[in-house]
Image: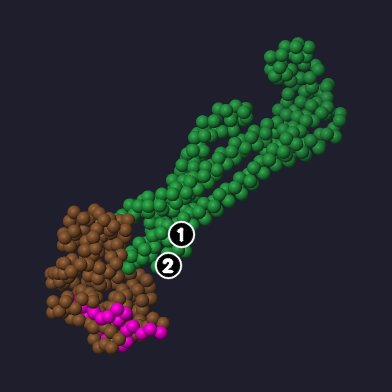
């Protein structure tokens, strides 16, 4: 009687216990995958804000070309500056008109002369922006106003941190529950089948031989639970992709399908197998005493 | 397979069951072990299977003192050469007879491609055709005992230990089973050690007899 056949025989003989083990792994990986995809979306949100002009320095009117260029050079001298964009008065008017194209009343009275020129600066490291802000806030002769989205970033960072930490705790607790559940269920199954194990041992079966079906059972729960947990959460998120991305527009919260998803599936299934195997191995080691 | 008991004593707490037992069973022997209840018949079987260890003395199989074996794998290896027929059958209830035999063959690493043909052979030998696909609960006592014998035989053992195999059978079934054991011993030269209460069996066959009992301890 083959190992696989014997293992499925064990699974069929206690269907409710098997279903509970499968459902526990399934729910754990459903939550895990949901969290991972949300985390990826949050990273996109952060990335969006981190790569957008984080600081806007509005210049006083009447600065000559040489002065503007010297300001640009000074900005460029800061480390980890990603991009410096000069918005002239004309460009500012064009942007303003574009933003308010549906409301002609707001645009007809506005001319380039009343809009300030500005520099939009983005950086690889948001801390640099704080240095720039401090440095230019003292230059009252050339700077009219500085708009720095520090609070938005900080708030976003702290929320992301909380979500990531909560997610990690949730995943840790879920994995622990899965481990304990499989360990206990394998123990119950071993107890239910102790006569069979004793008979097999009397017939000359090694301890590993009698453990094998239980180990494979753990692997099966891990494999199928993680696979279906991934697939369901994946299907839900990718079916809701237009709605989610519409809500976060212009940020792409749920990205296009790529190799990442295949890799994630492979890793999750591997983790599922490792959890199932280690829990059943511990269970078999603990409960098979004959 | 040669089995030797060298001054074997077995105590269960304060109760002495075997006392300085010396015996030698040679390959191809058919041996009856008899004696009243509690005289140590099953203990003798368990000692050979290394389920229990003697309080003193040695149990030697092919010259190796099995009670001194340290690793479980060495014990498993010896058990794989022994077929056992239990009084209470010890078949796995949720496997069919065929699956029970297949499991036994799998344990001894019997070639996978020969398992089905081997099952057919032993099923025919014990006359259980048309029953092998049934579960133990669907068979009569006699059929169960023959199924148990088929499982023991399937692994081509060097020795068969039969612990009161006829204990739960009616006279007709008991004699049929004894005849099968006799044929196996004659044709396959398999050593058979059978415990029994039945004096008629012992008288009917001209075989070695080990008599155990409170008075006769150590007299074999």
Task: Identify the residue position indicated by label 1 in the image.
Answer: A187
Q: Position of residue B99 (x, y in %)?
A: 27, 56
Please tell me which of labels 2 and 1 falls first in the chain. 1
> Which portion, as a residue range, is magenta?
B14-39
Magenta span contains residue B204: no
Farthest right residue in view: A141
State the image coordinates of residue A169 (x, y, percent, origin top left): 61, 49
The quarter in which the C terminus of chain B is drawn is bottom left
Q: Quadrant of residue B120?
A: bottom left
Residue A247 can be seen, yes or no: yes
Q: Mark 2: which secondary structure?
A: loop
Query: In the rendered structure, the residue with mark 2 lies on which chain?
Result: A
Instruction: Specify the colour of chain A.
Output: green
Q: Which of the labelled discs sits on residue A289, or is there none?
A: 2
Residue B131's place in the image compared with B52, above or below, is above
Report the quarter where the N terminus of chain B lies: bottom left
Circle 2: is it few (<14), some (14-19), or many (20+) Cα within 10 Å?
few
Is A160 left or right of B196, judged from the image as shown?
right
Horizontal side, residue A131 vs residue A237: left or right: right
Tell me the residue at 51%/51% (across/down).
A178
Percent x, y of residue B134: 25, 54
Depth check: give the residue in front, B126 or A56.
B126
Q: Provide the letter of the chain coloured brown.
A: B
Residue drawn where x is 66% and y is 41% of the image: A160
**What whole-number distance in Å separates the C-alpha atoms at marks 2 and 1?**
11 Å
- Residue at the spot 26% in from the left edge and 87% down from the top edge: B216
């Amino acid at each position: 009687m083959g190992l696989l056949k014997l293992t499925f025989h064990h699974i069929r003989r206690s269907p409710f216990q098997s279903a509970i083990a499968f459902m526990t792994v399934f729910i754990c990986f459903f939550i895990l995958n949901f969290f991972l995809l949300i985390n990826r979306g949050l990273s996109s949100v952060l990335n969006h804000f981190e790569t957008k002009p984080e600081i806007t320095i509005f210049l006083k009117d009447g600065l000559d070309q040489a002065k503007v260029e010297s300001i640009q050079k000074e900005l460029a001298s800061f480390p980890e500056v990603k991009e410096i964009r000069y918005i002239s008065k004309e460009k500012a008017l064009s942007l303003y008109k574009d933003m308010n194209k549906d409301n002609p009343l707001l645009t007809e009275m506005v001319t380039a002369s009343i809009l300030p020129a500005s520099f939009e600066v983005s950086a690889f490291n948001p801390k640099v922006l704080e240095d720039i802000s401090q440095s230019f806030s003292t230059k009252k002769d050339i700077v009219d106003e500085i708009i720095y989205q520090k609070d938005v970033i900080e708030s976003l960072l702290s929320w992301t941190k909380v979500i990531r930490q909560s997610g990690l705790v949730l995943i840790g607790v879920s994995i622990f529950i899965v481990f304990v559940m499989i360990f206990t269920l394998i123990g119950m199954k071993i107890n239910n089948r102790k006569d069979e194990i004793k008979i097999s041992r009397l017939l000359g079966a090694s301890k590993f031989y009698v453990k094998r079906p239980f180990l494979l059972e753990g692997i099966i729960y891990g494999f199928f639970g993680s696979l279906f947990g991934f697939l369901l959460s994946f299907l839900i998120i990718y079916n809701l992709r237009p709605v989610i991305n519409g809500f976060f527009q212009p940020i792409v919260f749920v990205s296009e399908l790529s190799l990442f998803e295949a890799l994630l599936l492979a890793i999750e299934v591997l983790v599922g197998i490792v959890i199932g195997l280690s829990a059943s191995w511990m269970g078999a080691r603990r409960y098979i005493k004959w | 397979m040669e089995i030797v008991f060298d001054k074997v004593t077995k105590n269960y707490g304060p109760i002495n069951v075997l006392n300085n037992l010396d015996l030698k069973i040679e390959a191809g022997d058919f041996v009856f072990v008899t004696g009243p209840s509690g005289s140590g018949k099953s203990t003798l079987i368990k000692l050979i299977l290394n389920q229990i260890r003697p309080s003193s003395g040695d149990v030697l199989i092919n010259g190796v003192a099995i009670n001194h074996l340290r690793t479980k794998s060495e014990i498993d290896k010896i058990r794989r050469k022994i077929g056992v027929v239990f009084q209470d059958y010890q078949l796995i209830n949720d496997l069919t007879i065929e699956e029970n035999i297949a499991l036994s063959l799998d344990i001894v690493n019997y070639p996978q491609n020969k398992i089905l043909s081997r099952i057919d052979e032993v099923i025919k030998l014990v006359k259980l055709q048309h029953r092998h696909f049934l579960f133990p609960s669907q068979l009569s006592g006699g059929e169960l005992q023959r199924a148990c014998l088929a499982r023991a035989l399937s692994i081509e053992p060097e020795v068969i230990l039969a612990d009161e195999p006829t204990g739960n059978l009616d006279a007709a079934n008991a004699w049929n089973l004894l005849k099968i054991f006799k044929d196996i011993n004659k044709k396959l030269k398999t050593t058979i050690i059978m415990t029994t209460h039945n004096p008629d069996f012992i008288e009917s066959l001209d075989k070695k007899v080990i008599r155990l009992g409170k008075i006769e301890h150590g007299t074999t």
